[in-house]
Image: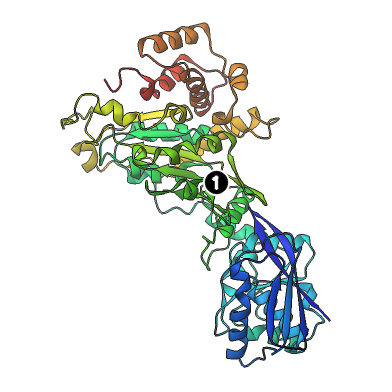
Amino acid sequence: MPVKTFGSAVYGVEAQNITVEVNIFSGKPIYLVVGLPDNAVKESMLRIESALTSSGLKMPRQKIVVNLAPADIRKEGSAYDLTIATGILADSGQIPLAEIGDYLIMGELSLDGQVQAIKGALPIAIQAKKEKFKGFILPKQNAREAAIVSGIEVYGISHVKEIIDFFSKGIKPELTIVDTRDEFYNAVNNYDADFADVKGQENIKRSLEIAAAGGHNAILIGPPGAGKTMLAKRLPTILPPLNLHEALETTKIHSVAGKLAATDSLITTRPFRSPHHTVSDVALVGGGSNPQPGEISLAHNGVLFLDELPEFKRTVLEVMRQPLEERRVTIARARMSVDYPASFMLIAAMNPCPCGYYNHPEKECICGPGVVQKYLSKVSGPLLDRIDLHVEVTPVNFDELSSDRQSEKSEVVRLRVIKAREMQDKRFLENDNINCNAQMSPQMVRSICLISDAGQLLLKKAMEKLGLSARAYDRILKVARTIADLSQSEEIGIEHLAEAIHFRSLDRESWAG
């Protein structure tokens, strides 16, 4: 008689329950795994045999057929080892059948019977609760991650022998309990860095404050050693804290990617991802034969920092254009299509030229004629079109560097950012897909970002005198609206427009000669 145990498969950031049916027949010993398993699943029988034998348990010397249902969905990975092993132990009479169907069981087995970590424990636990399972048995390394989900018993085990103890002897491991809200609120603002660490650069700090307040993408252009990377790394410290929903959503993505440590249960601070410029387009956006989230999804609800932007391959940068607009990425395969959220702030940094010293106040640029323009053209116009703030970073002078004057702390800046976001929350209350000024459509810009006749005249003169492109018009209005929000002003004033115009340096026809 077949025995049924239960596991789960993760597709995108959602899980689907898998029924594992095990049937042992008399006859020549042979192992058959059916139900669209990949090679890792097929190899599980060899791992299970070694794990059970090494642990003093019996592996039946008979024909064993394992079916993974539904059979038309591809099953991938080694996480079904423990699920299948439990079915074999039950069908061979080594553990009772009574309670097996009440628990979802997942884990990879080592040859000596140790239970190894799996990916996607959090979405699996969420699905197990939806399906009304009594509990979830999984590797100890993933127990805290799964215990975020309340209303389901979570047991972390480290060896296959504990399955025998669990179902035969009633000896259960200590229940893993995580107080999600307490853990979240205690760690929500725990950052190692602070804006106060940066000496000088007040104008750059101001630009990042505007970016944080409106959710704007920004590019920092300046010579080596000016502080671009240091400033970018501190941007998450001034963003509004994650709410509990955002924290769970972000944790699910990192869980699926296997990026959570055994001591982690919930991501409580905004992610900061900084891929190297040699990253491939699949690693950045996500994909692969077994689709996995890429860097843009791991940066969801946080910051994606691209240092040395022109050094990234053109194809890598171009694949970001659609996710930047839609705030999600769809990876299509012949048998399935998965969606990963990708709502992130893009912060890029670059030198102004190959040698790094174009427009430097002290050092001379050694680049030849036309080289600067060629270097800047590595970043395409359509990508720059999606970046609202172009910020020129200048080196910090010695007096500022050696000054004892205390800079403004991140928590002070964050309070202003939160107040500006509160104004935007009220403004976009009826728009479910709009959370901040940067996400406004052109139609919304025309209706929300109203300016006076004097403002129109200033904008017209700026576009003509500075050689600003037509695409800069909407961007300037969005940024001006954010600057007004930081001032707690309902109207966009002349001073707000003037500051916004200052942040379109790469649109100036004469910037690079």
Q: Considering only vertical position in the picture, is 83 above or below 181?
A: below
Q: Is residue 416 left or right of residue 201?
A: right
Residue 355 visible in this rendered orientation of the protein: yes
Quarter of the figure with the C terminus: top left
**Along the line of sight, the residue nearer the viewer: 234 or 341:** 341
**Along the line of sight, the residue nearer the viewer: 63 or 84:** 63
Identify the residue at image location x=71%, y=63%: 150
Residue 343 placement: quadrant: top right
User: Where is residue 312 drawn, in percent x and y?
Assistant: 38, 41
User: Where is residue 289 drawn, in percent x and y?
Assistant: 56, 55
Quarter of the figure with the N terminus: bottom right
Q: Considering only vertical position in the picture, is 368 above or below 280?
A: above
Q: Considering only vertical position in the picture, is 480 above or below 303?
A: above
Q: Residue furthest bottom?
A: 56
Q: Is residue 47 left or right of residue 274?
A: right
Q: Is residue 2 left or right of residue 315?
A: right
Q: Count all numbered tags in the image, as a single digit.
A: 1
Helix, strand or loop at mark 1: loop
**Amino acid type of disc 1?**
His
Q: Which residue is mark 1?
A: 300
User: Where is residue 452 drawn, in percent x and y?
Assistant: 53, 9
Identify the residue at image location x=61%, y=55%: 252
